[in-house]
């Protein structure tokens, strides 16, 4: 019987030394074209935009964005049906954006944490930053996806309303042109709303790695100053009432609408340029906070 010896690797026949075999399983180095940083950013943007609507994910992830999409389409269909039957415009393009304000806020409170908190919680950011992807690239790609997702939630039903409006239009080429200009105005208002609200929401979501907490923080961020606006509207003088809407992102956008589209310009008086400057400053500061947040994330 062969003599046995004991070692760290277990019992083995005496006189034999452990060895290993290298197997060639066909791995080769990639020698094709490297698409570079811009394509990485574009891919991250596309993936994040799909994630916002639950595309490529489980059915459960599609439920909430699907409900909001159906809601927006339903409002547009009802508005078009009423206009077709009665000839009256019950909900115009600007009013549709206002009607969708609460669903849009809920949408942002859900998708913003989904886009950033999951990566923070699972600690995969070092893998992102190991490639030719800068921290600022990651943050801006996520921001662009958030703004685009919010805009598309409004733009799709607006396009449906345009098609229905052109079908119901009886004013010939002049009426069709008037309908298109109204649609472009509504599209601009939708873009303005998506930019201001989305830029405000995403940095709040990035403050924590827990999605539930991030959603609550976003909700608080949008409503915490609402009582301040109400108090100034009720108790302040004329100037205070006209400037009160600056204190809240939701009323800030409404003030911009009043100034740009001349809807309720008396509510803000001659302070329209001030509203524009505050909106630009809010977007700039929010973006700077987001970039600073990802400069501090450990890689």
Image (cartoon, rainbow, N blue to C red):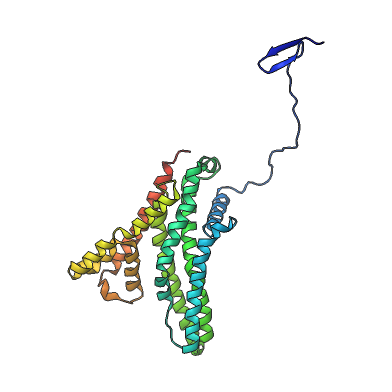
Q: Looking at the image, which is closer to me, 123 or 132?
A: 123
Q: Is residue 206 left or right of residue 172?
A: left
Taking the view exactly as shown, the residue that stands out farthest to the right is 1
**Please, is residue 131 above or below residue 265 in the view?**
above
Quadrant in the rendering for residue 242: bottom left
Residue 54 visible in the picture: no
Quadrant in the rendering for residue 261: bottom left
Taking the view exactly as shown, the residue that stands out farthest to the front is 1
Q: Is residue 210 left or right of residue 124?
A: left
* Residue that appears at 26% across and 68% down: 271
Q: Position of residue 206 (x, y in %)?
A: 42, 49
Q: Position of residue 264 (x, y in %)?
A: 30, 76
Q: Position of residue 12 (x, y in %)?
A: 74, 15
Q: Position of residue 135 (x, y in %)?
A: 47, 45
* Residue that appears at 54% across and 57% down: 61
Residue 19 visible in the picture: yes
**Please, is residue 183 above or below residue 120 in the view?**
below
Q: Looking at the image, which is closer to me, 265 or 212?
A: 212
**Please, is residue 29 above or below residue 10 in the view?**
below
**Please, is residue 257 above or below residue 112 in the view?**
below
**Quadrant of the image containing the N terminus:** top right
Q: Is residue 149 left or right of residue 245?
A: right
Please count the marks in the image: 0
């Amino acid at each position: 019987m062969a003599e046995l010896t004991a070692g760290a690797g277990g019992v083995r026949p005496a006189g034999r030394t452990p060895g290993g075999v290298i197997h060639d399983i066909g791995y080769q180095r990639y020698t094709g074209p490297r698409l570079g940083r811009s394509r990485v950013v574009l891919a991250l943007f596309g993936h994040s935009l799909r994630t916002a609507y639950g595309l490529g994910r489980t059915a459960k992830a599609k439920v909430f964005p699907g409900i909001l999409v159906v809601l927006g389409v339903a409002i547009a269909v009802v508005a078009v049906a009423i206009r077709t039957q009665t000839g009256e415009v019950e909900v115009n393009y600007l009013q549709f954006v206002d009607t969708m304000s609460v669903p849009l806020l809920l949408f942002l409170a859900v998708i913003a944490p989904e886009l950033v908190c999951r990566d923070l919680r699972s600690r995969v950011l070092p893998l992102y930053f190991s490639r030719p992807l800068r921290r600022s690239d990651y943050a801006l790609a996520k921001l662009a996806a958030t703004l685009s997702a919010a805009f598309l939630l409004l733009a799709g039903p607006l396009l449906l309303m345009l098609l229905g409006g052109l079908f119901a239009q009886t004013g010939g080429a002049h009426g069709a042109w008037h309908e298109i200009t109204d649609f472009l105005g509504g599209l601009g208002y939708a873009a303005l709303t998506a930019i201001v609200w989305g830029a405000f929401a995403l940095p709040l979501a990035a403050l924590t790695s827990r999605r539930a907490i991030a959603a609550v923080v976003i909700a608080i961020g949008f409503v915490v100053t609402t009582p301040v606006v109400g108090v100034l509207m009720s108790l302040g003088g004329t100037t205070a009432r006209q400037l009160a809407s600056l204190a809240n992102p939701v009323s800030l956008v409404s003030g911009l609408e009043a100034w740009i589209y001349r809807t309720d310009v008396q509510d803000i008086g001659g302070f329209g340029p001030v509203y524009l400057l505050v909106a630009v400053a809010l977007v700039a500061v929010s973006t700077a906070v987001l970039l600073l947040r990802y400069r501090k994330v450990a890689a």
